[in-house]
Amino acid sequence: LNRSSDLSSGTRGRPARSRPLRHHPRTKIAARNLCGVVDDPDESVAAAGAPPALRVPRRALVVLAGLPGAGKSTLLTRLDAPERTAILDSEQVRARLRAALPQRLPYRWYRPLVHFAHRTRIAWSCCFARGPVIAHEPSTRGGTRLMLVLFAVLTGRRRVFVWLHVGPEEALAGQHARGRLIRSRSFRQHVHRAYRVHRRLLAGGRPRGWQDVRLFTRRDVSGGLRLEMPR
């Protein structure tokens, strides 16, 4: 990214008993196009609300990552993508299972099945989709990121990691808005891992195994996101 964004949006407070968040960055930092996926629109276009563009090859796995509640599912609904793009959201799986299972069954009882089915869909789509695959996955865990790298490597897809940054309070508000909260302990762990990922990205690094990396804030993609392929 080539323009300044307030990457500390939503971080003025911190979850109770989450001491490491005291050092969460609060200053305005220039966001960067970290690994050269694509140039950003110029300032005048961005100010007009045009969505940023992400140029990827036909055989690419694009992972949309970030804290639970960051707005990844919402962004996928605003995605402008070419035909034959496989758009995968765990919410799609959850909705189907919720319709098939007893209504009174708590989500926590079948959450592992949702995760397994969603990741199976990602692997299947990497194998058989005729266009890019873009998948929602928090990916704060290193093991999850490496699993997705493996899916892409084995199926000959370029690995593109897109990080949607929000602060913990914003993410919690997003969870409340969707009506589904993750356990407080699990969320704190996500926050600490996400902080390390974000700090590494700001330093110009990238997660192991990923070829291209993009960093966005909610403000950057408030108008959506365009996925483009070279002609």
Image (tube, rainbow, N blue to C red):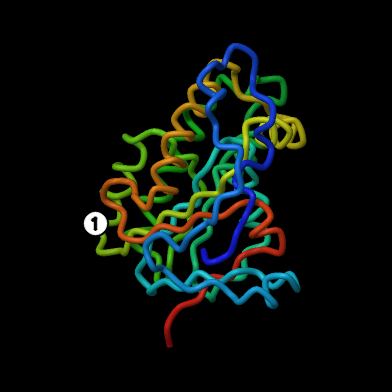
**Front-most of 14 and 75?**
14
Residue 30 found in image quarter: bottom right
Q: Which residue is farthest left?
A: 154
Residue 194 shown left or right of residue 221 in the figure: left
Quadrant assignment for the C terminus? bottom left
- At x 59%, y 18%, the residue is 183
- At x 41%, y 68%, the residue is 37
**Front-most of 208 and 88?**
208
> Which residue, given by chain and number where applicable, does mark 1 sit on?
153
Please state the horizontal and vertical placement of residue 182, each as a whole percent of the image.
61, 24
Q: Which residue is farthest top?
A: 17
Residue 196 sits above or below residue 157 on the image: above
Residue 119 found in image quarter: top left
Is label 1 in a helix, a strand or a loop? helix
Residue 103 found in image quarter: top right
Please state the horizontal and vertical placement of residue 178, each as a whole percent of the image.
73, 36
Residue 209 sits above or below residue 128 on the image: above
Please state the horizontal and vertical placement of residue 73, each as a whole percent of the image.
63, 48
Label 1 sits on what residue type?
Val
